[in-house]
Amino acid sequence: MQTKLHRWAKADYGFRFDDVFNFVCDPAILVMAFVRVAGNTGARTAGVDGVRAADVVASGVTAHLNHVRAELRAGVFRPLPVRERMIPKAGGKLRRLGIPTVTDRVVQAALKLVLEPIFEADFRPYSYGFRPNRRAHDAIAEIHLFGSQGYRWVLDADIEACFDRIDHGALMGRVRMRVKDKRVLTLVKAFLKAGIMTELGERNETTSGTPQGGILSPLLANIALSVLDDFAAEQWTNAMGSRRDRERRRRRGLPTWRLVRYADDFVVMVHGSREHVEELREQVSQVLAPMGLVQSPAKTRIVHLADGFDFLGFRIVWMRKRGTDKWHVYTFIADKPVASLKRKIKSLTQRLSHLDYKIALIRINQILRGWANYFKHAVAKHTLQTLHTFVWWRIVRWVMHRHRMTWTAIRRWLRGPQGKWKPISMDGIQLFDLGRVPITRYRYRGSDGIPSPWPDALEGPLPTA
């Protein structure tokens, strides 16, 4: 089904889909949607109705999905308000997270299964956030490539409260460009207007935005932000599409630029001057305004690549290679993720903590492995070794304080007969060694190197209804 929808969308970029509501109500689609919802970590969290995925399994999944399907068919399905949860951010700010009910999550997942292959045909290759088979490392690799090709001025931008400010009318207008099934449009709008149940028990109407936390929200945000991608594609095609066009523009003192976007975080790499970046900043603001979005004054800035900037947890800087006169673009680990990791380790190894050693080491290893897998493509060997030393000392001092151990006792515990230090191991769990993580370069895959989620959709005759 998804392959057919993607084929149709690819074959005609102006085609508007009708009668896709039947796909949303299809029993197989609803079953797949529930499997995805139940397999998610958030399945343990209930919405405003207090029902979890495990409760649905206990009462009968088939009966529950049949009831949902009957309501959808009858046109009486109404989503409940999302449960508000405020998540602390860096700097003392709070991020609003909306938790839908399990039933609403299932319907949203079904909608996503139907709508995603349609809109994926329209999304541009330089958009990487919340898209299948794409990741943050692709965006970093593309920035690395452009920086090496002379795009040295950077508009490091962030959209202020993106998920809370998207204009519903403008968003639905972009959805209607591809979907004309009124039942699907009504369902999408119902989720946008479902409201929020605050932590104080008050219900607030949602006049704008798509609550962050819903399964459908990332796709809707990408649909809204595709206005920026389309603007960049239009500029590139009309004025900078060929190498000769770019060289001609530069001889005339005009800039060439490329956009790299990951959800609501994006950078504009400019081959030009600071003045050119300032002009682009104003143009970007004008493009985002009809969607109700504005750039964050605190997080949006203009920098030169030689000064470096942070993006998706990495520090990207153009600098001279040590011992040579050659300059290269380097990707390091930014300061914020390092500080965040240290805070997590400190919270698990507080002196007065009575947490079981096995549980603590399992959790620490989970954090370290996930962190290492994300940052192992940066220039990070020294940072990883330093962090391993930090973690090692935190655990050793924790054990020393809890058991009133001396340094002599620690050496007797951790040093072998040959005088070599042994890895920390307690209750059968060994501490993960960050310093031994191999550093590998992430290769730029390009727009053609990223595999499609629906490879069969790229060849063969068009499917028939």
Image (tube, rainbow, N blue to C red):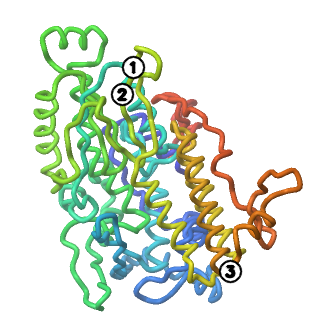
Q: Nearer the viewer, mark 1 or mark 3?
A: 3
Label 1 or label 3, whichever comes before in sequence order? 1
Q: Which residue: 77% across, 65% down?
A: 425
Q: Which residue: 16% across, 24% down?
A: 273
- Between 114 and 417, the one lying in front of the other is 417
Q: Secondary structure at mark 3?
A: loop
- Between 420 and 12, the one lying in front of the other is 420
Label 2 or label 3, whichever comes before in sequence order? 2
Using the rendered view, name the quadrant where residue 73 is placed.
bottom left
Q: Position of residue 170 (x, y in %)?
A: 19, 55
Q: Are marks 1 and 2 in contact (CB under 8 Å)?
A: yes
Q: Which residue: 51% across, 73% down?
A: 347
Q: Secondary structure at mark 1?
A: strand
Q: Please indicate, yes or no, whether residue 310 appears anywhere in the rendered image.
A: yes
Q: Position of residue 107 (x, y in %)?
A: 46, 70
- Is residue 224 left or right of 106 when viewed as pictured? left
Label 1 or label 2, whichever comes before in sequence order? 2
- Is residue 206 left or right of 416 when viewed as pictured? left
Q: In this figure, which residue is indicated by the disc labeled 1? A: 327
Q: Please indicate, yes or no, whether residue 78 appears anywhere in the rendered image.
A: no
Using the rendered view, name the quadrant where residue 77 is placed.
bottom left
Q: Mark 1: few, some, or many residues within 10 Å (few <14, many ≥20)?
A: few
Q: Are marks 1 and 3 in contact (CB under 8 Å)?
A: no
Tell me the kind of residue under disc 1: Trp
Using the rendered view, name the quadrant where residue 356 is placed.
bottom right
On residue 404, the disc is 3
Q: In this figure, which residue is indicated by the disc labeled 2? A: 318
- Figure check: 139 above or below 16: above
- Between 217 and 95, the one lying in front of the other is 95
Q: Secondary structure at mark 2?
A: strand
Tell me the kind of residue under disc 3: Arg
